[in-house]
Image: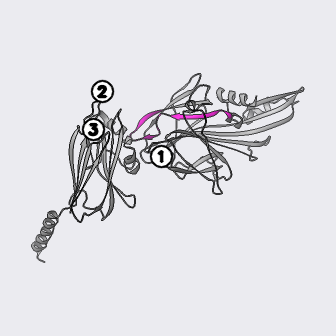
Amino acid sequence: MLRSIALAALAAGTLSFSTAASAHNVWLLPSSTVLAKAETITVDAAVSNDLFFFNYVPLALDNLEILAPDGRRLAAENPHRGKLRSVFDLRVEQPGSYRLAVVNRGLFASYQLKGERKRWRGSPEALGREIPAEATDLQVTESLGRIETWVTLGKPTVPSPAGQGLELRPVTHPNDLVSGESARFVLLLDGQPVSGVEVTAIRGATRYRDRQEEMTAKTDERGEFAFTWEQPGMYWLEASAKDGKVSVPAAKERRLMYAVTLEVMPQ
Amino acid sequence: MPYRKIVCALLGATLVHQAQAAELAVQLEIPRLNVAEYHRPYIAVWLEGERRDVHNLSVWYDLKMANEEGVKWIKDLRQWWRRSGRELSFPVDGVTSATRAPGSHRLSYTSDGVLARLPAGNYRLVIEAVREVGGREVLSQPFAWPPQQPARFQLQGKEELGAVVVELKP
């Protein structure tokens, strides 16, 4: 039930995102990640079990944040929302790395009303307004999720961290991945390395094999984790965490989620 | 100061130097392929030193397309792109030029030309070829520079490159 609400929230393009939705994969899929010349790329955005097949619901683009190499925010071109996926174009013109992210912030609440358990989602402002005064046993959870991909024209550069929630800091650059090699990254929580968090990596084209063949790694005391890519392809990395660093007083817990689509080139 | 003498001495030194120019020559065959859609391959020839230093020698890409559109696909020379290409802006003087037709092509790099500033050491000559709607192939040959004696290496490509002969002359 909670899962379907969370997914509905994503599908409807509301503010919320919950780790309860992590049973489904949320992803951005760029047409290219390594460019030699200024050109337009296109990106699919969807929620589905199969990577990277848009066969469930689109990912809302309301909270799309595109960071250019010079640090400026860019707007997507030609955004479109279909029944199964969202799509947008991006003109990649500056040398360096672009970070494309859908950042979803919001609240989930559950409460008791007239003997029934009710569920709610929305913004902090709407919380006081929309939860009935006679509600009891109110439980509020804050959520913050980032769904990313990176694209580089020419030489890779490293954008400054967003500083909020979970995100990745390169040791190996996300657009410098080759099969047979290992890649190392730092997982940040609110801009600081975070240890003991499990990160999962799954190669795309899951439809064409019997097992997910997922790899897992745990961040070490420096927040670092590494994967060795056995095959080229598009990979989906995901990590989630919980803590009590809420920004809304009513919330007890904060749920954090990070996912990134990475392209691993053949050797 | 006998200005003329200095000039003569310099000239003499240059002449001697030229007479002793060391050479790295590459005879490279682009195979003729019987395929429905043929495009000339993009080819990169470069040297890699022991400190992962890269020295670009020749890069061939499609110069015929309008607005340098041919640069878009240069990243498909994947290994070269990672080692060096992504650091450059195109065209690169003395390095980039047009793609070439099937057949045998001779490339010569000398100590009084592009190799003038190449430090002595062990190198790997790398040749990477990639063809639109075709395949990709990489060949390499280790050697020491400057060469102490003549040497000849014969390499054989399987798909995108044919016979490659590498010759070193002291």
| Dominant SS type (magenta) | strand
Q: Closer to the camera: disc 1 or disc 3? A: 1
Q: Are marks 2 and 1 on the same chain?
A: no
Q: In front: mark 3 or mark 2?
A: 2
Q: Is residue A248 left or right of residue A30?
A: right
Q: Are marks 3 and 2 on the same chain?
A: yes
Q: How many marks?
A: 3
Q: Residues within 10 Å of mark 3 (few under 14, many from 20)?
A: some
In front: B29, or A62? B29
| Observer-nearest of A16 and B159 | B159
Asked if one can make out residue A176 in the rendered structure from this viewpoint, the answer is yes
Q: Which residue is mark 3?
A: B63
SS category of the residue bearing label 1: loop
Q: Amino acid at mark 3?
A: Leu
Q: Nearer the viewer, residue A99 or A217?
A: A217
- Which numbered disc, 3 or 2, marks the residue that appears first in the sequence? 2
Q: What residue appears at the point 72 percent right and 28 percent down from the top-left corner?
A: A5
Question: In the rendered structure, which segment of residues is drawn in magenta?
Answer: A23-42
Residue holding disc 1: A178
Q: Residue furthest top?
A: A83
Callouts 3 and 2 close, C-beta under 8 Å: no
Q: Amino acid at mark 2?
A: Ala
Residue B112, image x, y percentages: 20, 60
